Amino acid sequence: MTTRKEITETGWNFDNSYARLPKSFFSSVNPTPVRSPKLIILNEPLAASLGLSVQALQSEEGVEVLAGNRIPEGASPLAQAYAGHQFGHFTMLGDGRALLLGEQITPQGQRVDIQLKGSGKTPYSRGGDGRAALGPMLREYIISEAMHALGIATTRSLAVVATGEAVIRETDLPGAVLTRVAASHLRVGTFQYVANWGTSSDLQILADYALQRHFPDVGADENRYLSLLQEVIKRQAALIAKWQLVGFIHGVMNTDNMAISGETIDYGPCAFMDVYDPATVFSSIDIQGRYAYGNQPYIAGWNLARFAEALLPLLHADQDQAVKLAQDAISEFAGLYHRNWLSGMRTKLGICNEEVQDESLVKDLLDMMQKYRADYTNTFLALTFDTPEDTVLFGTPEFAEWHERWQARLGRQQESKAASHQLMRTSNPAVIPRNHRVEEALESAVTHGDYSVMERLLDVLSRPYAHSPEQAEYSTPPAPSNRPYRTFCGT
Ligand code: AMP
Ligand code: MG
């Protein structure tokens, strides 16, 4: 039983269950204060849904909390220990520049992690400075909030505070702290850490904790740890399908960046695809294309296999049987993912029922998009509004033939044209955070201290399915360039 402290004036209502787990799971450490905190952006609707007073957060004291200069009542800051496979190589990691302040219990009774990112060194910092730069933190804010608006499970961004200190990267950059909100920060890598360096009782404690926190409906009569594996597989299958459907490329799907909750986490080198090409990679360090767009479902399966390995001792007392249970569960992933993806693709094409040939209809469209270098988002938009633009793809006889097949397919369902159109409107976003738009907003904010470009972009991205006239300019793809867009990790 926990005795809950009184809710503070700001609305902080912490109950820190993670801090009650075995001591080897984390290190208690306070944020390192920063010189002169300045609130750059506060997510007011999110603050309200967490039960936090916007006014109090904007006050000097509130900003000090968001900067890590003041510990709010009831918080117990800690850095979480975890391991992970980074580009296939297993290593010890942990929160090197982030701290869990505590778990906020929202007015709806939900428990969410409040984490400061860029809050200073921890025992897991290795050679790093524990800090973050303003540009990348605003980038996380923009893209995570865009993902949320697109209907994709994700960590959220509550605020970004500039620190008034420089962080040293290739050049000196303005520093910042991001406040991240997550269902939890349990990762596949958390399980790998405990499976490798903890006791068997530690592993069971962690698994029970994850079940209680994310899958409270799993019954006591089942093989609970197998259920945990199966539920995580289900959530990831649904999540990755959603990524693929909007053209999101995570960029660094290491096992430490895969959340047990099924939320998208870690917005380092991620970016959205413009031209449809499964080989698309933006991350500057992903030389081999391990985390290319088309590889994401495969990598998710690989990561889940690492999760299953970590859980083996809990699945069955007999090792062979445990392995068999794990393999059977993992073998479900590809099919589950594919069903999620195909049903999402059907909605993108306005198809309400199922026919066997639907998959080839989708595949033929994607193949043409790749061949004629069509913009992924805008192709679906043009189909939705029946406005085939003057692009190479739409001018081909192949497309005309495909369009006829698609129309015939729509004719074979009971739903009206209007219903089909409505389904497409709500399945095909008008706007995604296009790389050149995000860069433009960051450039304005970081170099010129002008946040209006970012604010406008955030506003447009908050209603991706509105299809309103003022959004039109945001759907323009970037001008062709010889220099490919590049993103960076650990910035
Ligand atoms: P990421 O690429 O964000 O998943 O980070 C991988 C690991 O590096 C995590 O353990 C981070 O906490 C750590 N890390 C990244 N940047 C820094 C930094 N500036 N200082 C300390 N640790 C860092
Ligand atoms: Mg990470």
Image (cartoon, rainbow, N blue to C red):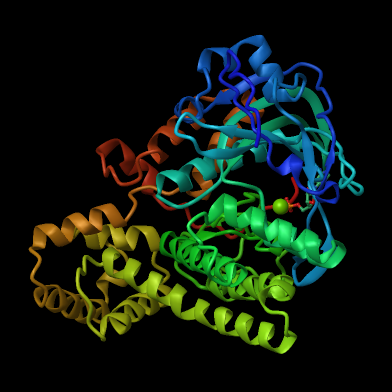
Using the image, determine if residue 181 lies above or below residue 453.
Answer: below
Residue 340: where, in percent of width, then height? 39, 70
Residue 427: where, in percent of width, then height? 30, 57
- Residue visible at 75% across and 19% down in the picture: 70
- Residue visible at 66% across and 48% down in the picture: 185
* Residue 392 seen: no
Image quadrant where one finds the N terminus: top right
Q: Nearer the viewer, residue 118 or 173?
A: 118
Q: Nearer the viewer, residue 238 or 251?
A: 238
Using the image, determine if residue 300 lies above or below residue 326.
Answer: above
Q: How many marks?
A: 0
Q: Nearer the viewer, residue 220 or 117?
A: 220
Drawn side of residue 8 relative to residue 391, left or right: right
Report which quarter residue 369 is drawn in. bottom left
Residue 18: where, in percent of width, then height? 71, 43
- Residue visible at 82% across and 68% down in the picture: 90
Drawn side of residue 296 relative to residue 102, left or right: left
- Residue visible at 59% across and 75% down in the picture: 301
Drawn side of residue 348 relative to residue 18, left or right: left
Report which quarter residue 466 is drawn in. top left
Residue 225: where, in percent of width, then height? 62, 68
* Residue 361 seen: yes
Drawn side of residue 379 relative to residue 10, left or right: left
Using the image, determine if residue 257 lies above or below residue 474.
Answer: below
Image quadrant where one finds the C terminus: top right
